[in-house]
Image (tube, grey):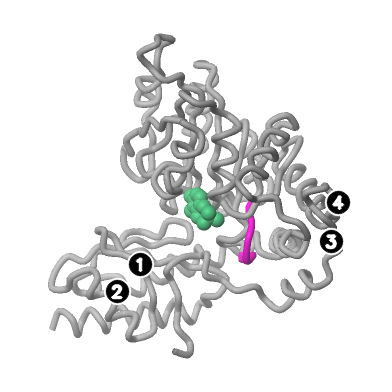
């Protein structure tokens, strides 16, 4: 169907013409030998941007988090993460499957907030009954919610007091930075610097087709590079992909504010639609719940038939705003949602 508005995820973006041109121009080499200039340039640049000694370009956010977990933790070690953290719940259990690493899920105390007492209670004493607690993992944004700076500071300080390493799944770090106001590059650095390692996705809101970066100390990144190879993630002329990520860093960071504005606009325009409880926009995401008349999978299908794609029904519908969704699209999507609900609820 023409002019479908795809709000399922910010991963659905297609590389723009100038991004494709940058990919075509990329100066490449064999990155497994460390010879790819475009990969090396990206790694140096993102490390400097976020205040780390080293970075590693990897194929996906999942591979980035898995390399981080395998580098921080050994067999019989444990990491703490929120129960619905992507790296625990949505990554195929990779750390358990491949690393013998045990997760310790933490409750979500509402809107993605984590309670320091829950972290404290989850750290195990040095006793053979328990796995060794090694690592605290946080996610920012988490379900679209940007963590409060004070919470980040307190949680990472607490981890350090217990000699835990800290990892940030910052798949949408730049969305969090934009939400914090001010210069998003400085904002991203202020968030990232609190952690021992950080993962950032180029293929979400930044609009690149493939790729993430993992950041950390030189030693940590050396270890992660070994794991990346073992995981089958050593890519050869990966510079064509790194060039897209570099282009995204140049051109697609500040514009994330437009996605946040479009999400807010959508909430306002859809507000009060019959049968749908719509939450406030959280950075580039909107969550809504059907309250009467329509069953969730049914609503997803009805919207799709009218050219608006979203995910949902467990129990929330999710609408995600990104590079390929204009302001007009956001307005049109809201009208389609209202009309569909009016028809469905009679
Ligand atoms: C998408 C996502 C990832 C994983 O990224 P992929 O590139 O899809 O593997 C990790 N963490 C969070 C929070 C994400 O949203």
Q: Nearer the viewer, residue 27 or 114?
A: 27
Helix, strand or loop under label 4: loop
- Few, some or many C-alpha atoms within 10 Å of disc 2 (few <14, some 14-19, many ≥20)? some
Does residue 333 appear in this view?
yes
Q: Position of residue 12 (x, y in %)?
A: 52, 70
Helix, strand or loop under label 1: strand
Left or right of 273? Residue 15 is right
Give the dominant element type of the magenta stretch: helix, strand or loop: loop
Left or right of 171? Residue 266 is left
Nearer the N terminus, badge 4 or badge 3? 3
Q: Are marks 1 and 2 in contact (CB under 8 Å)?
A: yes
Q: Residue at coordinates 46% horizontally, 65% vertically from top-left?
A: 9
Whole-number angstrom distance, CA of label 3 to CA of label 1:
38 Å
Whole-number angstrom distance, CA of label 3 to CA of label 2:
43 Å
Which residues lie in the magenta part? Answer: 207-212
Tell me: residue 21, above or below residue 183. below
Please give the residue where the numbered disc 4 appears in the rendered image.
35
Tell me: residue 241, above or below residue 346. above
Quadrant occupied by the N terminus: bottom left
Nearer the N terminus, badge 1 or badge 2? 2
The numbered disc on residue 102 is: none
Tell me: residue 155, above or below residue 306. above
Helix, strand or loop under label 2: helix
Quadrant occupied by the C terminus: bottom left
Please give the residue where the numbered disc 3 appears in the rendered image.
28
Please give the residue where the numbered disc 1 appears in the rendered image.
311
Q: Position of residue 149 (x, y in %)?
A: 52, 37
Whether residue 300 is in magenta: the answer is no
């Amino acid at each position: 169907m023409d002019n479908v508005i795809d709000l399922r995820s910010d991963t659905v973006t297609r590389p723009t013409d100038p991004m494709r041109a940058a990919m075509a121009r990329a100066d490449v080499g064999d990155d497994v030998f460390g010879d790819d200039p475009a990969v090396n340039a990206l790694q140096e640049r993102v490390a400097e941007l976020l205040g780390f000694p080293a970075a590693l370009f990897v194929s996906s956010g999942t591979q980035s988090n898995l390399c981080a977990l395998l580098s921080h933790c050994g067999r019989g070690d444990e990491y703490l993460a929120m129960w619905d953290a992507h790296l625990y719940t949505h990554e195929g259990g990779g750390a358990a499957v491949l690393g013998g690493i045990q997760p310790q899920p933490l409750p979500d105390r509402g809107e993605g907030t984590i309670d320091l007492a829950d972290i404290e209670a989850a750290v195990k004493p040095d006793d053979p009954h328990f796995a060794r607690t090694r690592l605290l993992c946080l996610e920012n944004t988490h379900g679209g919610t940007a963590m409060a700076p004070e919470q980040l500071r307190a949680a990472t300080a607490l981890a350090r007091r217990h000699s835990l390493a800290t990892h940030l799944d910052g798949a949408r770090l730049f969305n969090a930075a934009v939400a914090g106001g001010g210069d998003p590059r400085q904002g991203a650095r202020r968030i990232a610097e609190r952690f021992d390692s950080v993962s950032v996705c180029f293929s979400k809101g930044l609009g690149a087709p493939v790729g993430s970066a993992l950041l950390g100390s030189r030693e940590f990144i050396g270890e992660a590079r070994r794991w990346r190879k073992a995981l089958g993630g050593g890519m050869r002329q990966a510079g064509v992909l790194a060039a897209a990520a570099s282009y995204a860093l140049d051109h697609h960071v500040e514009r994330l504010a437009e996605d946040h504005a479009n999400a807010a606009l959508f909430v306002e325009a859809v507000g009060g639609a019959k049968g749908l409880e719509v939450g406030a926009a959280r950075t580039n995401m909107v969550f809504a719940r059907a309250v009467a008349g329509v069953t969730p999978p049914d609503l997803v299908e009805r919207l799709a038939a009218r050219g608006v794609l979203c995910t949902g029904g467990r129990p929330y519908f999710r609408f995600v705003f990104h590079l390929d969704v204009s302001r007009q699209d956001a307005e049109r999507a809201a009208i389609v949602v209202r009309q569909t609900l009016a028809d469905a609820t009679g």
